[in-house]
Image (cartoon, helix red, strand yellow):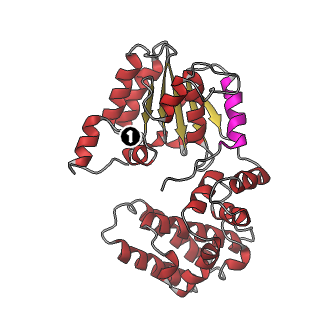
Amino acid sequence: MSEPAVALAPWIAAQRTSLLSQRGHAWLLQGPSGLGQYALGMELVRAWLCDAPTVQGACGHCGSCHAIDVRTHADLCVLMPEVQMMALGWPLSEKAQADIDDKKRKPSREIRVEAMRDAVEFAQRTSARGRGKAVLVYPAEQMNHITANALLKTLEEPPGDVRFVLASEAAHQLLPTIRSRCLGYTMVWPAEADMLRWLAGQGGVEPAAAAAHLRAAGGRPDDALALARSGRSPQAWAALPQGIARGDVSVLGDWAPAQAIDALQKLCHDLLAASMGAAPRYFAPGDLPKPPSLGALTRWSRALAKEARTADHPFNAGLMLEALVAQARNTLHSRH
């Protein structure tokens, strides 16, 4: 069963209208995850390629808009890690798809240099529909140095009819030369009331749970929607801190190690905040156990950051979850 469609957030529509009124061949959309960089980038390229655009964006009905909807537009090149391309329904190159189907390799978690070289060649071709071409790179920080340098030359000397959108959730990781050749734009953080109304209007999201999901996502609307649609209840999230303090691995359910580490990092953040007299961000104050010493929390934070670097490739996911929970319990009961 396919996921319900996501209605365009009003703050994304407002930012789209603002950016379309400005000139530039390359935009860098930057900000924390969950603020809609991909959605805004798609809105820009849809408007640029649309057969009948308005000041508010693409018409949504023409042949160009339809071609983007079905992922077949000849003048749009989308560059993403292969895992995200597949998750969002974008086709891979024939060779990449064949390699993955034949199990010669797994889908890449970074933007491959071969895909970037194809994009450079794409930028040099004549527009198929006569309205120019567009390249969308997301998340742009997933380019390695070789891939980024392949893009850099095209950004320095862009063909006359191609425009670029680089959407990033960690723009500081991009090469300074990449950043300097784009018009930078920092994503707007919406008002809480606007986010709650939008979340409550999405299919499958209970209005009463919207606020809890938004808190669990740290106030980031796209992440809150993903949480709401993941099947994890607000009650289970609220019970997680005390469950971890008891050493109960079952509170993590069927989470992948990377998801578990993310949740534990949020718990660690809130306990650090509470120990300094600040308000927690991801959990309600009453859901948190008593914070251990600042030193213990600092050591735990560093250990979680180290674990996060290899979380996608654990030797045994079950054993890793047990080790993470044991580490957390020991920290929460530490006296030093």
Q: Which residue is drawn at 39% across and 30% down?
A: 149
Q: Say which quarter of the image contains residue 153.
A: top left
- Residue furthest to the right: 193
- Return the residue at label 1: 111
Is residue 104 rendered to the left or right of residue 147?
Answer: left
Is residue 34 rendered to the left or right of residue 250?
Answer: right
Q: Which residue is drawn at 61% across and 51% down?
A: 222
Residue 76 in percent (x, y) is at 46, 27
Q: Does the magenta stretch include residue 14?
A: yes
Residue nearest the viewer, comparing 81 with 5: 5
Q: Give the range drawn in magenta.
A: 8-20
Residue 182 visible to the viewer? no
Residue 302 in percent (x, y) is at 50, 66
As displayed, is residue 125 above or below residue 266? above
Residue nearest the viewer, comparing 150 with 92: 92
Residue nearest the viewer, comparing 321 with 328: 321
Residue 86 visible to the viewer? yes
Q: Which residue is drawn at 58% across and 47% down?
A: 5
As displayed, is residue 295 above or below residue 65? below
Q: Say which quarter of the image contains residue 150.
A: top left
Q: Magenta stretch: dominant SS?
A: helix
The C terminus: image quadrant? bottom right
Label 1: how many residues lie within 10 Å, few (<14), some (14-19) or many (20+)?
Answer: many
